[in-house]
Image (cartoon, helix red, strand yellow):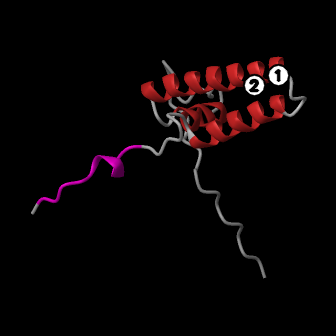
Amino acid sequence: MRAPIHQSMTRAPLLGGGHPRLTVINAVLALAILSTGLHWWTLMLAVSVGLGVQWALRAAAKRHPEWPIVYLRHLREPSIRPAHGRAWGVPEKPKPTVPSLPRWTP
């Protein structure tokens, strides 16, 4: 039996075309710029920064909707990993992934 799956159930939720967290941060940043003073130049600066950053968020989300999560995962990974093999000779005994339990002594 087949059941149709609506396209909205498989797509990432976006806010204004960008990732929701970054869109909210963008709006707060634009409001912070605007709150420095109600002058025409602060209004223009807040609108241009808000629209420019939102345009960049939408362009990035078109390429990959979950790019902030992927980027944060990339930052958590070590840049250089230790070698785990040898070209010649006897291979090293693999290190246990689960630590061994201490022996019980009465």
Give left or right: position of 90 versus 102.
Answer: left
Tell me which secondary structure the magenta stretch mostly adopts. Answer: loop
- Residue ID for mark 2: 46
Residue 25 percent across, percent down from the top left: 70, 38
Residue 44 percent across, percent down from the top left: 75, 19
- The reply to whether callout 1 and callout 2 are in contact (CB within 8 Å) is yes
Residue visible at 54% across and 34% down in the picture: 18
- Figure quadrant of residue 52: top right
Image disc number at residue 42: 1
**Residue that extends furthest to the bottom in the rendered view of this protein:** 106
- Figure quadrant of residue 70: top right
Pick the front one: 4 or 73: 4
Mark 2 surroundings within 10 Å by alpha-carbon count, few (fewer than 14), some (14 through 19), many (20 or more): many
Pick the front one: 29 or 41: 41
Residue visible at 50% across and 22% down in the picture: 59
Residue 102 percent across, percent down from the top left: 71, 67
The residues colored magenta run: 2-11
Q: Secondary structure at mark 1?
A: helix
Residue visible at 70% across and 24% down in the picture: 47
**Residue that extends furthest to the left in the rendered view of this protein:** 1
Quadrant of the frame with the C terminus:
bottom right
Q: Secondary structure at mark 2?
A: helix
**Residue that extends furthest to the right in the rendered view of this protein:** 37
Q: Amino acid at mark 1?
A: Thr
